Amino acid sequence: MSVKVIIIKDKPIAQLVVSRDITTIGRKSDCDISIKDPAISGNHAEIHKAGDGYIVKDLNSTNGIMVAGNKVMQHNLKHNDVVAIGEHQLKFLISPVKPRSKLAATVRKKLRSPVKSRQEVSKPATVANSVATRPGIQGATKPARKVKETGLKPRSPAVVAARVGETRAQAMANLDGFLQVISGENSGEKIRLQVGLTTIGEPGVQIAAVSKKPQGHFIIHVDGGKDKHRVPLVNGEPTGFKSRKLESGDKIEVAGVEMEYILGS
């Protein structure tokens, strides 16, 4: 699915394509979509990729987000939707979804990253002075050259320790995780959490999503069915409407089904 966002203030001033699992919007320069508007909070909202669609979520901003004149905390985006944020509007142009085969009763839609590059928000060709986008993540850094070959001076212990920490973090990011169902008729079933986003739950009842980031796996509420305030439980505690990092051994409950998060190679 291709999602194009047109940023409007009286007239279109910029456009970009969204392809990240999570795209941040706000006044801060490090947001994926940075809009210099005093009516917009530093971290104002996020666009989440959820299954075959996208949702926009307000991050408890000062002025909120508006859809069709109504203030909302989150909204399932449709083609030609216009979301008002501060003095600007975001118009979403969403391409049709290709037909997909039906999945098992427990929804498990696994979205993989593009082959050629990591998920990113592509930089628009022309951007107004009031709008900026953060460049996508470039490829992996080249390995450090050996000291004997380059004649470089040995690094300080602090630098070496920092690089060791980076190596450990990278090793953790490369570990795969999975959810093991521990209740109900599907008890014992394993759901592999691969690159991208994995949605879990039952449509119309409750849906959540688990995304893989460099820091680990994070769970976030997507849809509560008839009860819009129903959110996933982690170790018996509600996650709220923000993402929560999972630790190995955490017990998750979504749509009445209990699962255990396990991190492994």
Image (cartoon, helix red, strand yellow):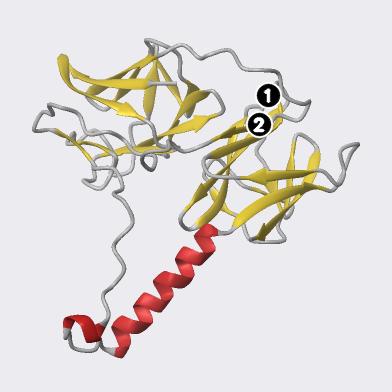
Amino acid type of the residue that numbered disc 1 sits on in the rendered structure: Gly
Q: Nearer the viewer, residue 196 or 207?
A: 196
x and y, in percent, of residue 104 in the image: 77, 26
Rendered view: 179 above or below 131? below
Q: Are marks 1 and 2 in contact (CB under 8 Å)?
A: yes
Q: Residue drawn at (24%, 89%), measured in percent from left and top?
A: 154
Q: Is disc 2 placed on a helix, strand or loop?
A: strand
Q: Quadrant of residue 100?
A: top right
Amino acid type of the residue that numbered disc 2 sits on in the rendered structure: Ile
Earlier along the polypeptide chain: callout 1 or callout 2? 2
Q: Residue drawn at (67%, 45%), measured in percent from left and top?
A: 192
- Residues under labels 1 and 2: Cα distance? 8 Å
Q: Is disc 1 placed on a helix, strand or loop?
A: loop
What label does residue 143 carry, if any? none
Q: Residue drawn at (66%, 60%), measured in percent from left and top?
A: 264
Query: Pointer 1: what residue?
Result: 225
x and y, in percent, of residue 48 in the image: 46, 33
Query: Pointer 2: what residue?
Result: 207
x and y, in percent, of residue 8 in the image: 21, 18
Q: Say whether residue 6 is left or right of residue 186.
A: left
Q: Quadrant of residue 166?
A: bottom left
